Amino acid sequence: MLRSRPLSTIVSRTGLSARVRVLVSREVWLATAFLLLNALLGVFWFVALVTLISLGLGLAYTLIGLVILGLTMRFWMAGATLERRRAGLLLGTRIAPPYRALPERGILARALARAGDPATWRDLLYLVLLFPLGIGEGALVVVAWLLPLGGLLAPLWLPYGSAADTAQPSVVLASVAALPAALAGLALLLLLPRVLLAVARRHGALALALLGPTASRERTLAARVDELRASRSRLLDAALLERQRIERDLHDGAQQRLVAVAMGLGLARGKMQSDPAAAAALVIEAHEQTKLALRDIRDLVRGIHPAVLSDRGLDPAISALAGRCPIPVEVRVDLDHRPPEAVESTAYFVVAEALTNIAKHSAAAHAWIGVSCARGRLLLEIRDDGVGGAAPAAGGGLAGLADRVAALDGRLVVASPAGGPTIIRAELPCE
Amino acid sequence: MRVVIAEDSVLLREGIARLLRDAGCEIVAAVGDGPALVAAVAEHRPDIAIVDVRMPPSHRDEGLRAALEARRRVPGSPILILSQYVEERYAGELLQSGPGGTGYLLKERVADVGDFVDAVRRVAAGATVLDPEVVAQLMARRRHNDQFAALTTREREVLALMAEGRSNRAIGDALAIGDGAVEKHISNIFGKLGLAATEADHRRVLAVLAFLRS
């Protein structure tokens, strides 16, 4: 497909036959269409935007005015989206949408996020600039096509044109006299692709600059992608380690106990007739082992996912964790709605890990847990009055938590100077 | 004693039914989901309903919700909840759902047949029986509460055993003290928790409730 080829390769081609081929190539026609459309769309957007924005601003003290402004913003963003597609289709200039991610819910929240995104305003700037640029480009296209065509066809129309009644001796002579004009027209015609394509390319570059992602945003995104890739692979490693731990726990705990139970019961079965007393002792032993196996499984299951968390949410789940902690823990949970399950679960495991660390290493006498929600973020704080010095070592519990939190677009900060106190703060999205 | 069992695992349902039949109970209905439990309690008005927390369709806390609904329809129905795990929050919801014998035990307590049948009888008789695991959670959480700080260590031990649904005599045996001493501790507990003198059984429930709420 010629269409998708960059303009420069076509423009730089030399040789007359190549130039003629270029003249009738798709690129030139598409560029012509593109530039003519610029004029039409430029006028349309200018009129539409000036009308709608002045109407909206005039009524801005009422709800209707604000609604009009909001809808106008959506309208020009749709226009910019269309422009991106048009540049891709007619010029082969692919422009990625530059917008930031929007909040999931809430019409107002989404509108405000759009208004706060510089890309929205660059869209507007482009559409307004399209007016003067489009007019100029439209005029250029008309002149660029009509001038060479007029010259080239001069021998045909000059004898019958306005000069016909002057002192030209004959039609043939008049046509001959028009030959220089025809040659000039031909030269201009061969120059036409170069000019049109160059103008179209400039316009494409401007569209890319205004409608596409900015360089700094692209750099930020690239850095973010690297960061996400790294944390994703760490998460996968952590998930694998976790599975191995569960396998080991099951194998060393419940499974061994059940083997012992089966063995004991097998022995008891053999002795039932011959030595009932010994058989009874074996059955009692097996009974005790079964109960221990059940306790092992219960502890393991709670470590994988506590049922009370899905059933009742963070408050009771964290309270239960606090209740099992050997030191007194004060819990305060202020949430007016339940966060998404992934957020709840991550918050829970942050608290679980933090409390385990506090119990093991901190020598603290008290701990405090606070959970609250502000501006769409879940804020989690775990504080103790221990000796401090906690650091997120690679592969350790705290580092794993930081990855889990990062996977949800959250942040985990550990402040633990030697001598204490230790404060762990996590921030998670909580829409 | 007429019993309704709600448990979605057939193996366990039959197991519990057999165990209770051996103990001389009559199983009037054995069902596998919440709505069937509510219907069975409304129809049979059993002496006790034994309910698994997790049942279809979502396998979360349907059993508990259905049990609360059944108690709303038939006030005073004794209910014993069995669960793979115990959390004080569930105990609180159950106890606050109104009068009537209330039990909340780990499912694995079924393995101690004698203790389990005993708990079933006590709940059917109107007592409150909480799993020692729940009581331990409660104790851990309440250590620094003012009201409970006023209780002596011995009084706290007595309160814990009361929450487990033990009789005065069983409490005395467990702590190796006499009946009189147990009664004295209990009346001290009532006093310190500010519970007025009413019918003794009801006050025991109130004490456990105060314990849960604090």
Image: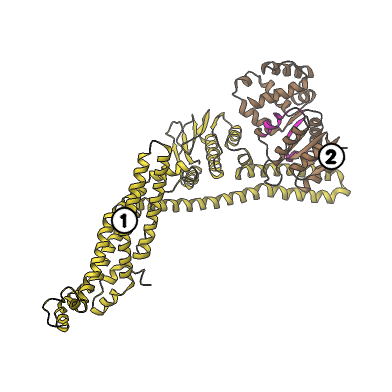
Residue A254, how many percent across, how many down? Answer: 68, 47
The answer to whether one can see residue A403 in this image is yes
Magenta stretch: includes residue B50: no
Q: Kindly tell me whether residue A214 is visible in this rendering.
A: no
Residues flagged by tags 1 and 2 on a common chain: no
- Display colour for chain B: brown
Residue count near mark 2 (Cα–Cα under 10 Å), binned few <14, some 14–19, many ≥20: some
Q: Which residue is mark 2?
A: B20
| In front of the other: B30 or A108 | A108
- The letter of the yellow chain is A
Q: Residue A189's x, y, as percent?
A: 23, 73
What chain is tagged by disc 1? A
Res A316 quadrant in image: top right
For mark 2, name the chain.
B
Label 2 secondary element: helix
* Left or right of B62 on screen, residue A421: left
Which region of the structure is painted magenta? B90-112
State which quarter of the image contains the N terminus of chain A: bottom left
Query: Which quadrant of the figure has residue B207?
Result: top right
* Tag 2: amino acid: Leu
**Which element type, helix, strand or loop, lies under badge 1?**
helix
Q: Which residue is mark 1?
A: A42
Position of A223 with respect to B34 (left or right) is left
Which residue type does callout 1 highlight?
Answer: Gly
